Image (cartoon, grey):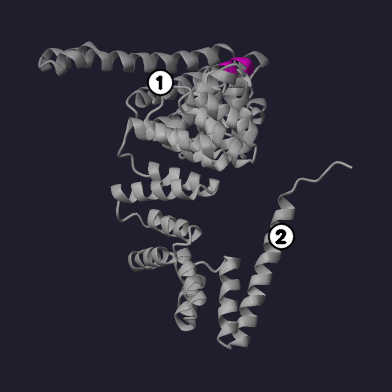
Amino acid sequence: DLGRILTASGRKDQGESFLEKARELQNKVLQTSQQGMASHYAEEGADSSTSAAVIMPPSTEDNSQLDVGQSTKADPFAQVDPGVLARANLTERQKEQAEAQEKQLRAVLAQSFSDLATSEAIRQNYNAALGHYQEAEHWDLTLPGLMRSLGTAAFRAQNYKEAVRALSAAIALNPNDGGVRAMLGMAYFGEEKFSDAARTFEPLGQRGMQDGAVGYAWASSLTRQGETKPASTVLAEFEKGDRTGDTLLLVGQLWIEIGDYERAVASLHHALQLSPSLARAHYFAGQAYLRWEHWNEAAQEFQAELALNPDDGEAKYNLAFVYLQQSKRAEAQRLFQEVIAAHPEHANAHYEMGKLLLDQGELKEAIRHLEAAVRLNPGADYIHYQLQAAYRKDGRLADADHELEIYKDLKTKQRSRASAAIPPQNP
């Protein structure tokens, strides 16, 4: 270390002198260790070359001392084969010493890789750190704190599958480690294993609900499973914290998924108070009002979003949909046309346009839009139903019957999926 410091500070000659001494000492230590090992086994009455073959990896040049079952392509991390020790002409004491030495060397290698990984993690080089923690695990998975460190590096590297594996082992050793539990839950959330995430978060209690990352992930996991009541409890506790506008935007969307539209609007308006030009906040407030069937308020929110972003096709489409509910058909049709012109891939805009034109008796244009909608979203049963009605009005009975069969088939599949999703009832 002194040699490196001197060299780095410009005193190269002095530094090289110390580095040379360090190299000499390292060579002497290595030589002494090898001689001591050979002498030790000689004193115990065993052949030193055979003993060395037990401890050292197989040589590609001479493996005559090794068991014939040994392969030069063996797993470099594997433990010494007990069978090799049993046939190595060693006394019981020598075998115990060999095993103890292997255990010690494995611990040294594991600690070295772990220390290297820690230095990389400190520099936020998490992928490299993960690889070296994994090497440490191969050498000695009992190294204290290793699985916690490995899981943390994997989590930071967004390798959630590996994070789950390592952090699960760590939490099994210390179930009260809140930091590991939080990361494990977040890793499950990243893997979209929402049931496991919610189960992992639960012991964190109120502290977890209030955490800036855990609280939202916990509430979202519960929502994805349809557990809206506990999700509301967690989300309400999470929202009590000092949240940014961007976070409140996410909170508002989650309240919409839960179905509490009043709280969704309140959260989104709070976000707008913090950041009046926050993109999509008015849009999602409009979504909440739309599902709440508060048409006037929904229209105002979508108009406010378009004032901030005139090219927002979804805001324009939803405003047109609200106009339909308000019987403003001409305004709705104009907006649907604008959406299709800017976003010809918008299936629902084609669908709504087709319905409007069908009501107006413009069959050819209606069919053109409905056919476009079917191409863009072939799994939507309601589009097939509307298209069959248009074909039937146009006298295209075979086409109409074909679309009707597709509609019936899609509805049957939907009912089957819905039935499969219902948990069985206890008799």
Q: Residues within 10 Å of mark 1 (few under 14, many from 20)?
A: some
In this view, 216 is above or below 368: above
Report whether 368 appears left or right of 414.
Answer: left
Q: Is residue 126 magenta?
A: no
Does residue 158 appear in the picture of this structure? no
Quarter of the figure that contains the N terminus: top left
The percent coordinates of residue 312 (x first, y second) are 34, 54
**Viewport quadrant of the C terminus:** top right
Q: Report if residue 336 is visible in the image.
A: yes
x, y percentage for residue 329? 44, 65
Position in image of residue 413 (x %, y %): 69, 63
Q: Identify the secondary structure beneath mark 2.
A: helix
Q: What residue does disc 2 label?
A: 415
Q: Which residue is mark 1?
A: 115
Taking the view exactly as shown, the residue that stands out farthest to the bottom is: 395
Which residue is at 59% across, 38% downward?
223
Q: Horizontal and vertical percent for residue 412?
A: 71, 65
Q: Nearer the viewer, residue 87 or 243?
A: 243
Q: Quadrant of residue 285?
A: top left
Cα–Cα gap, marks 2 and 1 = 57 Å
Query: Magenta residues?
Result: 95-100
Q: Nearer the viewer, residue 116 or 374?
A: 374
User: Closer to the observer: label 2 or label 1?
Assistant: 2
Give the mark count: 2
